[in-house]
Image: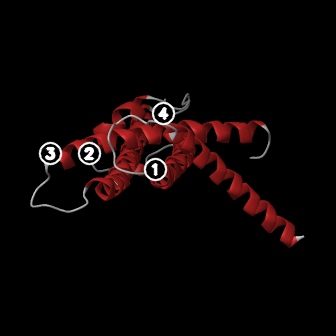
Amino acid sequence: MALGSLFGGSSASAPSAPLSTSTSSASSQQLKEKLQNQITQELAVVNATELVNKLTENCFAKCIQQPAASLTSVDDLCVNQCSEKYMRAWNVISKAYITRIQQASSSGELI
Amino acid sequence: MSELDPQELSRLDEQSKKDIMKFINSENSKSKVQMQIHTFTDMCFKKCISGPVTTGQLIGNEEQCINNCLNRYLDVNIKVVQQLQNVQK
């Protein structure tokens, strides 16, 4: 589960605090947490897989003009830089999109 | 990752079932937003990063372009929905 640790580590501990359960029995509580952890894990894998796919697609297009017998050092450098650039772009989009969502929901555009 | 026994699930009490449904709904909407971020990043990276990659940083107006790309896309999305709503009337 290598991909899970890429994203799961942070998202598993962040907002998924156990919900209130004053009435739950101990075994139900335990099972619930197990389920929620599994869901968080699987979504983290889906998210990481999507990033890997999109990143590969974009950086392959940018960096591998003429596929050689192996990755050249030029290819290698390009892929490294391209990956970093792509993740920076991801962060910019993420921030801007969440800002827009918040604006829309506070102005009543969204329910 | 250990497999869940379906039989175990039936032992969940009502409150836990409700909690889990709530959890799934919120994770679902989070996941949708994440998937949209992937789509937008893909689209705006293609639009804004022109020419060969020479650095891992966002340089020149790349960051501005990405911001504009996202915001104009959402503007267009809203506009299209409004137009369709007008046609319906």
Residue count near mark 1 (Cα–Cα under 10 Å), binned few <14, some 14–19, many ≥20: many
Q: CA distance from mark 3 to mark 1?
A: 24 Å
**Circles 3 and 1 on the same chain:** no
**Circles 2 and 1 on the same chain:** no
Label located before the other in sequence (3 or 4): 4
Q: CA distance from mark 3 to mark 2?
A: 8 Å
Disc 2: which residue: A78
Q: Nearer the viewer, residue B15 or A9?
A: A9
Q: Chain of mark 3?
A: A
Helix, strand or loop for disc 4: loop
- The reply to whether dot 2 and dot 1 touch (C-beta < 8 Å) is no
Q: Amino acid at mark 4?
A: Ser
| Residue drawn at the location 73% of the way across and 63% of the way down | B80
**Circles 3 and 4 on the same chain:** yes
Q: Amino acid at mark 1?
A: Phe
Name the mark on residue A16.
4
Nearer to us of marks 3 and 1 is 3
Disc 1: which residue: B45
**Circles 1 and 4 on the same chain:** no
Nearer to us of marks 3 and 4 is 3
Helix, strand or loop for disc 1: helix
Q: Amino acid at mark 2?
A: Cys
Q: Residue A96 location, x and y as percent?
A: 59, 38
Name the mark on residue A73.
3
